[in-house]
Image (tube, grey):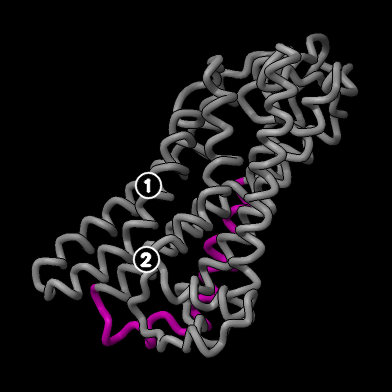
Amino acid sequence: MENNVTEFILTGLSQNEQVQQLCFFLFLLFYMILMTGNFFIVMTIQRSPNLNSPMYFFLSFLSFVDICYSSVTAPKLIIDFQAKVKRISFVGCMVQLSCVHLFGCTEIFILTVMAYDRYVAICKPLRYTTIMDWKVCSILVVVTCWLRGFVHSFTQTILTVQLPFCGPNLIDHYFCDVHPLLKLACTDTYAAGLIVVANSGMISLSCFVILVGSYTVILLSFKTRSSEGRHKALSTCASHITVVILFFVPCLFIYLRPSTTFTEDKMVAVFYTIITPMLNPMIYTLRNMEVKNAMKRLWLGRNRRYPDVKLNGVGTA
């Protein structure tokens, strides 16, 4: 069956003009905060010798992925708040779909890698520098995160681009995603929906289970630690657990079910595409004196007032 659709129409978050005007300024503010916060994280870690550890290497990579991930959907969303008809070409839609799943899946794996890093740092502190050397960190980023993200994205894109779209072109969403597109296809998409669940849903679920298992082991290890060590380890894990909950719960809600769409999907998607990437810099730096002091030295030039803090394997991110 031929594909007769050359463009799609997005419904956006709301059809109410007053709500759209309010959302325009609100999401523009969100995006500016997101870009500024994550940019500062990346630049601070890259330019601060005292933040030269795997934990901060992964954190800077997470911030970079957050910038890319949100930039796939947020600018288009903000512009569409001012547009009467929210158009996107077929090719543009497929590119957006591919990038959303590339960076989204990469973020899932980087959060999993960060949990493994914290597990090694807290449960195997004497072997931390041996296990998490820079070669291992590079392999984890390239193979575990980027390569798997690319494979996942390629699968989702190929699955969708070969579907026939012969009539309706109204996407009930603010960006191109698999479930809304499956709903528009002029063929039976039951098998495709199962593949989406097996691909997106199971990746999210399996990584979430690994994360829960890692933090359970870490929490159980607190029994053998002093109160000071317990407090430091808990501070290390608290920010990671918060981000994991904010990112994974919405993802599981969207992708761990058959190819059906709900009205709540758009608002849920806002959390893992914009809200969580915006909050990540604040969550990771709120109780992290190393990063806060490095930012003050780098951006405010307060070298004397904020001396370098020696960093070991168990940081406080």
Query: Percent x, y for residue 256?
Result: 45, 30
Query: Percent x, y for residue 14?
Result: 68, 17
Residue at the (64%, 14%) spot, across then down: 188
Secondary structure at badge 1 equals helix
Q: Specify the segment rendered in magenta.
A: 123-152
Q: Is residue 3 visible?
A: no
Question: 306 or 37, which is in the foreground?
Answer: 306
Q: Give the quadrant of the C terminus.
A: bottom left
Which residue has dot 2 on it? Answer: 116
Left or right of 286 on screen, residue 227? left
Which residue has dot 1 on it? Answer: 208
Question: 193 or 50, which is in the foreground?
Answer: 50
Would you say the residues marked 1 and 2 are in contact, meaning their CB atoms lie under 8 Å apart?
no
Instruction: Identify which amino acid the numbered label 2 is placed on.
Output: Tyr
Instruction: Identify which amino acid the numbered label 1 is placed on.
Output: Phe
Question: 276 or 152, which is in the foreground?
Answer: 276
Compared to residue 136, the image places residue 3 above or below, namely: above
Residue at the (13%, 71%) spot, across then down: 227
Compared to residue 272, the image places residue 55 above or below, namely: below
Residue at the (80%, 27%) spot, across then down: 80
Magenta-drawn stretch contains 131: yes
Query: Percent x, y for residue 98?
Result: 71, 42
